Amino acid sequence: MMDETVEMQDDRGQWFVVQTLSGHENKVRDTINRQLRMGDSVPVYEAMIPVERVMEIRRGKKVQVTRKFFPGYILVRMDLYDEEGRVDEKAWYFVRSVQGVLGFLGGENRPTALTEEEFRDMNPTLGEDAPQPTLIIGAKIGDIVRIKDGAFMGYEGNVQAIDETRGRLTVVISIFGRSTPVDLEFWQVEQAV
């Protein structure tokens, strides 16, 4: 999913991956886009952060959140090379001089642009066939969890199966000395300490 700062579709330039200081992705993207709106005449067209939509369980409720697809990196659409294949110094220094930028990915002296397929892979929520947000759960098969809600509250058991589409998991607990599978929702369990 492209972030909201991109207003119109433009086919100029190629997408390059730019490495930033950890936690400075928004600041770098905003600085580049602000400079472009101010009318800097460089062959740089936009900056974006690839994000994905995921569902998380917070306080017992499913909440949709967006999270960075590749933390520490942003995408910049620009014409880095001129017609003869030389690096355009204005574009190069425009991006490199932004505070928080560490460099281009794919070769420091001659970065490689993303192919169309790579760009689509980094933006899985583009287009009509965008996937539904996935649900994030902190447990995996074999983990020991504690049931924190429902008829079996306080019991501990092993996670036997996870159904992410329904938001449920099967936990095997011991009742009267017998192993009993219990079907629960994600928010009803927590990691056992």
Image (spheres, helix red, strand yellow):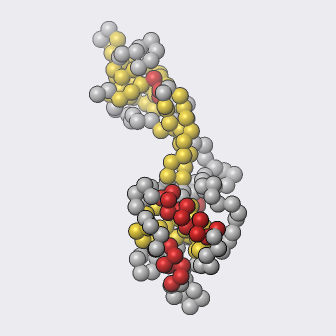
- Nearer the observer, 133 or 96: 96
Residue 8 percent coordinates (x, y): 70, 63
- Nearer the observer, 171 or 13: 13
Residue 158 percent coordinates (x, y): 34, 26
Residue 163 in view in this figure: no
65 shown above or below 148: below
151 shown above or below 100: above
Placement of the C terminus among the 4 image quadrants: top left
Residue 136 percent coordinates (x, y): 47, 38
Q: Residue at x 50, y 59 (%)?
A: 27
Q: Which residue is at the far front?
A: 38
Q: Which residue is at the far bottom?
A: 84
Position of residue 21 in the picture relative to residue 87 (left or right): left
21 shown above or below 156: below
Q: Residue at x 57, y 42 (%)?
A: 133
Q: Quadrant of residue 23?
A: bottom left
Q: Residue at x 40, y 77 (%)?
A: 108
Residue 178 percent coordinates (x, y): 33, 13
Q: How many marks?
A: 0
Residue 37 in view in this figure: yes
169 shown above or below 95: above
